[in-house]
Image: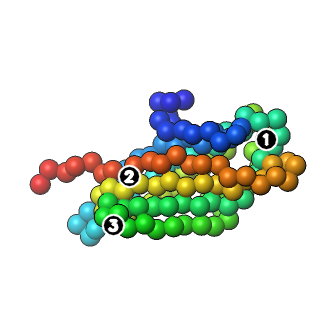
Amino acid sequence: MEALFPLATTTGTVTVRVSVSYLPEQSEPARGRWFWAYHIRLENDGEGAVQLLTRHWVITDGNGARHTVEGEGVVGEQPLIAPGASYDYVSGCPLATPSGAMQGSYRMIAEDGHLFDVAIPRFALTAPAVAE
């Protein structure tokens, strides 16, 4: 699992795993645009189902400029994750610099109605160096 998802953090019974890839075919460095895809896996190791309600991201570019993204669900869904199950999704992030980082949290609700936040590990967005 670590080979597929090198970054992971666990909050309570929910583990968030992250894999990130630079997408040169969607990037235009000459126009100040770099693009990454990130694959998230949410694993529920608890005894009850949990549902992802909202997301909160802090995206920092290579110049230190921070951008916050908040909203309902992920990729248009508010997945319900059964005990012992996982949920995967892929999304993307453009930056105006060849490097940066993302981190954040998900607001979740347990079967008993308890709201809790799950940390998303900080991960780097780094474009490969290109020889001139």
Whether residue 72 is situated above or below residue 112 in the rendered picture? below
The residue identified by callout 1 is 82
Image quadrant assignment for residue 99 = bottom left
Nearer to me, 27 or 99: 99
The residue identified by callout 3 is 96
Nearer to me, 107 or 42: 107
Whether residue 57 is situated above or below residue 18 in the rendered picture? below
The residue identified by callout 2 is 125
**CA–CA distance in space, label 3 to label 2:** 12 Å
Q: Report whether residue 28 is seen.
A: no
Query: Which tag, 3 or 1, sits closer to the chain's start?
Result: 1
Apparent side of residue 79 relative to residue 57 in the rendered image (left or right) = right
Amino acid identity at mark 2: Leu
Residue at the (63%, 67%) spot, across then down: 71
Query: Which tag, 3 or 2, sits closer to the chain's start?
Result: 3
Apparent side of residue 12 relative to residue 111 in the rendered image (left or right) = left
Amino acid identity at mark 3: Ala
Query: Which tag, 2 or 1, sits closer to the chain's start?
Result: 1
Residue at the (59%, 61%) spot, across then down: 56
Apparent side of residue 22 relative to residue 30 in the rendered image (left or right) = right
Amino acid identity at mark 1: Ala
Image quadrant assignment for residue 46 = top right
Q: Could you tell me residue 36's position as x and y percent?
A: 41, 54
**CA–CA distance in space, label 3 to label 1:** 38 Å
Residue at the (68%, 52%) spot, across then down: 117
